[in-house]
Image (cartoon, helix red, strand yellow):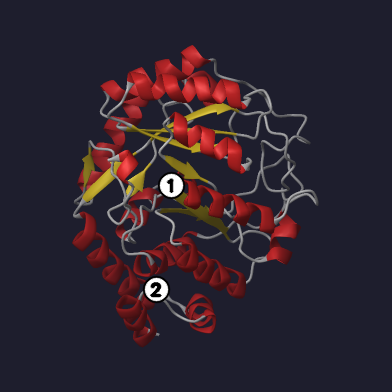
């Protein structure tokens, strides 16, 4: 087991069979061995800086009906909301004053936010905060839409692939969605010039060690600048309400494998990690992650953006959350960085 981790550290890739073997057989001792390696690689490349991204969850409407998601259009119990352009800009204003230099505009696939509306919002944010990076996370779009957003000033795009296996993808999504189209979107985003983020759920229903190994192989081939993973957490108004949640241990182990596979990647310690364990985000940083994403959304709407049950930080004010995270990171020997925090191996002359 340790020899495989040494091999991964040296070569930054394993075979599918080797990844699957590690995932199926790791224990506490092997995990700690992996985490030490992952921390060393992370500190070598990024020091002890933790980059903060200001998350703005601007719409809880979604046209999709994914089986695991609380925002699915079939959930008649969900409380829906949309932030206005002025509300979004107010979130940016507060975030900027608190030291945020990256804003993440995230929402369901909401037809109300046409390309025209999105372009207006993007241009307004970039003109008001030209020294900040803007990340979008608004789902599957056409090449033309992605290109228009990029030309308007969007820098990064997050689109979790969820699972690289076509059959597994079909078990998690409605029939009109496909893993093939999701991957097409990610390729389009890379070709356009975005800093691209993909990712997957750990412990999602029907997932096998081979599925997770496929994810690692796919991510290595895609070479994204960001990878966001978190444990699957069920939501009570979905078809997966009674499915078992993913575990902290496996999620942290996958974080460590990701750090050695993509040494320069920006990898968040997610809110979902902090939801299943009170110290989950700190443990994620110590497993090789280097990003946290505090919520800048108005506190009165956060409880409505419930992708999964028991989501943390739904009542905190942005300033409280920022200060809290800074103290928590300092407690484990890391520092919140006030910068855009671009991926070190990303080169795009248009954006420099």
SS for callout 1: loop
Residue at point 78% right, 49% down? 174
The residue beneath circle 2 is 28
Q: Does the CB distance between marks 1 and 2 fall below 8 Å?
A: no
273 or 216: nearer the viewer: 216
Q: Say which quarter of the image contains residue 305.
A: top right
SS for callout 2: helix
Residue 206 in sight in this render: no
Say the numbered circle drawn on residue 302.
Answer: none
- How many C-alpha atoms fall within 10 Å of the one at disc 2: few (<14), some, or many (≥20)? few
Position in image of residue 180 (x %, y %): 68, 58
340 or 295: nearer the viewer: 340
| Left or right: 211 as drawn, with respect to 126 | right
- How many C-alpha atoms fall within 10 Å of the one at disc 1: few (<14), some, or many (≥20)? some
Q: Quadrant of the C terminus?
A: top left
Residue at point 62% right, 21% down? 81
- Number of numbered discs visible in the structure rendering: 2
Residue 166 in sight in this render: yes
Residue at point 80% right, 52% down? 175
Q: Nearer the viewer, mark 1 or mark 2?
A: 1
Position in image of residue 256 (x %, y %): 38, 66
Residue at point 49% right, 62% down? 222
Q: Quadrant of the N terminus?
A: bottom left
Position in image of residue 7 (x %, y %): 35, 83
Q: Say which quarter of the image contains residue 156.
A: top left
Note whether 139 is above or below 34 in the view shown: above
| Left or right: 73 as drawn, with respect to 340 | right
CA gap, disc 1 to disc 2? 40 Å
The residue beneath circle 1 is 193
Q: Earlier in the sequence, mark 1 or mark 2?
A: 2
Position in image of residue 59 (x %, y %): 59, 26
């Amino acid at each position: 087991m340790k020899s495989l981790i040494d091999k991964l550290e040296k070569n930054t890739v394993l075979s599918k069979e080797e990844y699957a073997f590690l995932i199926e057989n790791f224990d506490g001792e092997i995990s700690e061995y992996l985490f030490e390696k992952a921390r060393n690689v992370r500190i070598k490349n990024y020091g002890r800086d933790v980059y903060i991204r200001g998350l703005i969850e601007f719409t809880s409407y979604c046209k999709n009906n994914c089986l695991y998601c609380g925002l699915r259009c079939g959930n008649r119990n969900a409380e829906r909301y949309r932030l206005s352009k002025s509300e979004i800009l107010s979130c940016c204003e507060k975030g900027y004053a608190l030291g945020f230099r990256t804003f993440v505009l995230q929402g369901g696939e909401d037809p109300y936010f046409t390309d025209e509306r999105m372009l207006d919002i993007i241009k307004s944010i970039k003109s008001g905060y030209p020294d900040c990076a803007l990340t979008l996370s608004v789902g599957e779009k056409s090449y033309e839409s992605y290109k228009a957003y990029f030309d308007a000033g969007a820098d990064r795009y997050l689109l979790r692939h969820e699972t690289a296996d076509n059959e597994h993808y079909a078990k998690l999504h409605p029939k009109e969605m496909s893993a093939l189209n999701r991957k097409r979107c990610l390729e389009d985003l890379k070709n356009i010039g975005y800093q691209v983020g993909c990712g997957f759920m750990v412990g999602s229903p029907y997932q096998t060690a081979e599925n997770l190994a496929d994810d690692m192989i796919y991510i290595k081939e895609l070479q994204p600048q960001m990878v966001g993973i978190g444990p699957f957490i069920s939501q009570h108004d979905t078809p997966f309400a009674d499915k078992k949640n993913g575990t902290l241990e496996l999620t942290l182990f996958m974080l460590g494998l990701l750090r050695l596979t993509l040494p320069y990647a920006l990898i968040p310690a997610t809110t979902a990690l902090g939801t299943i364990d009170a110290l989950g985000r700190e443990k994620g940083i110590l497993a090789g992650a280097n990003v946290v994403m505090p919520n800048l959304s108005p506190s009165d709407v956060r409880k409505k953006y419930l992708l999964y049950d028991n989501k943390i930080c739904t009542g905190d004010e942005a300033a409280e959350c920022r200060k809290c995270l800074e103290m928590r990171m300092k407690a484990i020997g890391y520092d919140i960085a006030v910068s855009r925090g671009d991926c070190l191996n990303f080169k795009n002359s248009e954006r420099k």
